[in-house]
Image (tube, grey):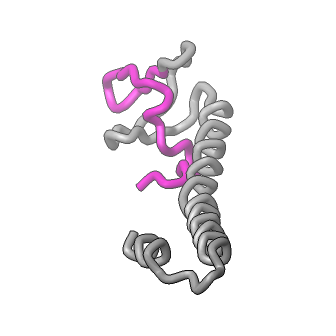
Amino acid sequence: MNLIAAALMAPTNGQGGAGMGFLLVQIGLIFAVFYFLILRPQSVARKKHAELLAALKKGDEVVTAGGLMGRVKEIKEERVTIETGTSAVVVHRQRIVQVGGTAAPGAG
């Protein structure tokens, strides 16, 4: 923010629009870097996770975000029943972070 304040207070020497144009280019570059380093990778990771969950089927070995490991026993809409040890646990589909050996992007 100090760069923006300095650019706004800098003398223009008769070139009123040149300083403002340079400032707008800098702000545009900051937004471009923000998009390519933060927003776009998150979007790609979300898409890959959705594809991983869409391919989920009965019998797959899964790991949840809480660390439960087990085998898919039943799938109903957003609820997945996982058989782990001698018990069965119902979890939300979005909480599954690994199917087989394939981990969701950004998990772990």
Q: Tell me the residue at 38%/41% (across/down).
A: 65
Relative to 8, say whether 86 is above or below.
above
The C terminus lies in quadrant: bottom left
Q: Position of residue 99 (x, y in %)?
A: 55, 42
Give the position of the N terminus as an image quadrant.
Answer: bottom left
The image shows residue 35, relative to residue 73, as above or below, that is: below
Question: Which picture quadrant has residue 55?
Answer: top right
Front position in the image: 97 or 32: 32
Q: Height in image: 28 above or below 6?
A: above
* Residue 20 against residue 44 in the figure, above or below: below
User: Could you tell me residue 18's position as x and y percent?
Assistant: 66, 77
Please report the residue visible at 55 percent of the width from the left and 13 percent of the height from the top. Answer: 76
Residue furthest front in the image = 14
Q: Is residue 20 magenta?
A: no
Farthest residue to the bottom: give it.
13
User: Is residue 14 or residue 105 the one in the foreground?
Assistant: 14
Residue sitting nearer the eye, 65 or 73? 65
Q: Residue at x 59, y 25 (%)?
A: 58
Q: Count every numbered label the image shows and give the total.
A: 0
Residue name at image x 49 percent, y 31 percent: 94
Q: x, y percentage for residue 9?
A: 43, 75
Point out the stretch of residues depicted in magenta. 80-108
Q: Please state if 55 lies on the left or on the right of 90 as rendered.
A: right
The image quadrant that residue 59 belongs to is top right
Residue 80, how many percent across, how many down? 48, 22
Of residue 94 and residue 80, the one placed in the foreground of this image is: 94
Would you say 91 lies left or right of 43 here? Answer: left
